[in-house]
Each structure stands twice: as structure tokens, then as C-alpha cells.
Image (tube, rainbow, N blue to C red):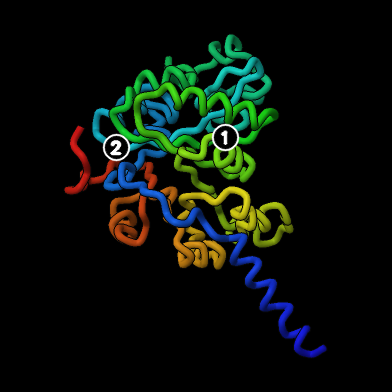
Amino acid sequence: MLLVFLLIPVVLAGLYVFCLLPQLPRRSMEPFLGRDYAHRGLFDNEGIPENSLPAFRRAAEQGFGIELDVQRAADGTLMVFHDDGLERMCGIRRDLGACTFNELRAAHLLDTEELIPTFAEVLQTVRGRVPLIVEIKAGANLAGTCAQVDAALQRYPGLACIESFDPRAVRWFRRHSPQRIRGQLVFSPYRHRPLRRDLKSYFLSAMPGNVLTRPDFIAHEVESARHPAFLLARKLGARTVAWTVRSQEQMDSLRGSWDLQIFDSFVPERRSEEPSD
């Protein structure tokens, strides 16, 4: 009986390690490597707002990869926008998912003439010049959003991978578009909510859902990257993507220990190994 009790934690630990495993054997991400990725485009939120066509055009012209956010409007149009609500970027107290495309076209980003772009407009702007990391935001019809993103990327001539905080989105791509490189986005709730119990966040940060998604990479918040689950996933072979890097000094200190870095708030020095476009 004592032996059984001693074996229980060993079995549970082994089961957790199995659940945490990334995609193995590792698939090549070579085309994505050797670049830094502009978070929501190369923006300054003064003349060039985040997730705007000028921000994406500027990033592509300077040879930076691009990270962007996709979510679905009420009529099914794929829009590129980060927040659930429009208030921070547009001064409107409504959720993007409750608005139609025509309603969103009346909104401007910050105090500029820039509009919330559609995913199709962004793809047309970038034109395959640099790789994309497409974050899929959770919404009312997540499967529908994934299917639309996949269909758009199937027609797109450029290089793109997907990521999401929601394992269901990553799982969708594993099942329906397995050739697409996919990543699990993670942050540590311990840093953000030290006094609040949020069981869902704690559960997701432990990444047991990897058993269903088998992500090619883990995109983790830099400031909480000492999370034990993340460190173990790295040991088990997961590629790693750092977000969000906010200075050249921080970027240099992380170089070599992360596979990719997503940055904003500065323009990085061009890397010697970075492909020329």
C-alpha cells in the first residue's frame, strides 16, 4: 500500500509532462528565424497607431516581421484590432464583436484619420514581404474565426503562423490545418493577480492543454518567463517567442536564449543575419 501511495505522485508527474509536451519532433521554423517582430506593426501611437495599415507598411518596408491581432466583427468580417472594446483606441464604448463592418468604418484610431483595417487589407498591404505572426482573439464564434483566418492564409502568398491564448484556437489549426506553424500564448497570472484567485488563468498558464494542441512554439510574456511550466516546456523542446520586448538593451540580453522576439516602443538595430527584402 505504501508503494502505491509513493507511485501516485510519480504517475501524476509523468502524466503532466506528457500533457505539456510541444510538437515533437520539432518542425522547422527556419523561415521565421533571423528577424525581430513588430508588435501590432511598427507604430508610435502618435501619427501611426497600432494595428494600422501605416504601422504594417512601415514594418514591412524596414524588414521587420509583424505580429498582429485578428477578431471577428458582428457580420463576420475579420478585423485587425487588439482590444475587445473600442474605447482605448477609438473612444467608443462598444465591443468590436458587437459592431458590423460598416459601423466600425465610422471609427478612427486615436486622433488620426486611420481606420480599423480588415485582415484582407493588411494582407494586401504586407504582400508577403515579411513573415506574419497572427494572433487569433477569442470570440463568440471562435471556430468560425479560425476557419476564416485559415482560408485567407491559404490564399496568401506570404509566410504566416498563428498563435492564441485560447487553446481551442490552436487545437483547431492542429486538426484542420496541421501544416500551419502554431503557437500557444501564455502569461503568468501570479505576476498580474497575486491577491486574486483566477483558477482559469492559473490552469491555462500550466499549459496542460498542450496535449490537445501540441504547439510548435510557446509565446510567453518576458516579465513572467520564470514560470515553472514554461521552463519545463522549454526543457522538453518547445521553441520560445518573447513578448513584449521594449528596449534594445532588453532585446540584446535575450538574444540567443529565445527563438523569436516581439517588440514595441523602440526600433531595433538591424540584425546582421536578418534577410534583406
Q: Position of residue 245 (x, y in %)?
A: 39, 50
Rendering coords of residue 252 (x, y %): 28, 57
Q: Is residue 192 visible?
A: yes
Q: Quadrant of the N terminus?
A: bottom right
165 and 217: which one is in front?
217
What residue is rendered at 61% in x and 20% in y? 73
Left or right placement of residue 139 versus residue 163 in this view = right
Element assignment for label 1: helix
Residue at the image position 42 percent from the left and 54 percent from the top: 26
Tell me where residue 199 appears, x and y as whole percent: 73, 56
- Place residue 60 in its image quadrant: top left
Query: Where is mark 1, residue-wise?
Result: 176
Residue 259 located left or right of residue 184: left
Q: CA distance from mark 1 to mark 2?
A: 29 Å
Which amino acid lies under the numbered mark 1 shown in the image of this protein?
A: His
Above or below, comparing residue 261 to residue 72 in the picture = below
Q: Residue at x 55, y 67 (%)?
A: 228
* Callout 2 amino acid: Phe
192 left or right of 39 in image: right
Q: Residue at x 17, y 48 (%)?
A: 272
1 and 2 marks in contact (CB < 8 Å): no
Q: Which residue is mark 2?
A: 64
In depth, the one of 50 and 137 nearer the eye is: 137
Q: Tell me the element at label 2.
A: loop
Q: Quadrant of residue 188?
A: bottom right
Crowding near the residue tagged with mark 1, few <14, some 14–19, many ≥20 C-alpha atoms within 10 Å: few
Q: Position of residue 210 (x, y in %)?
A: 59, 54
**196 or 16: which is nearer to us?**
16
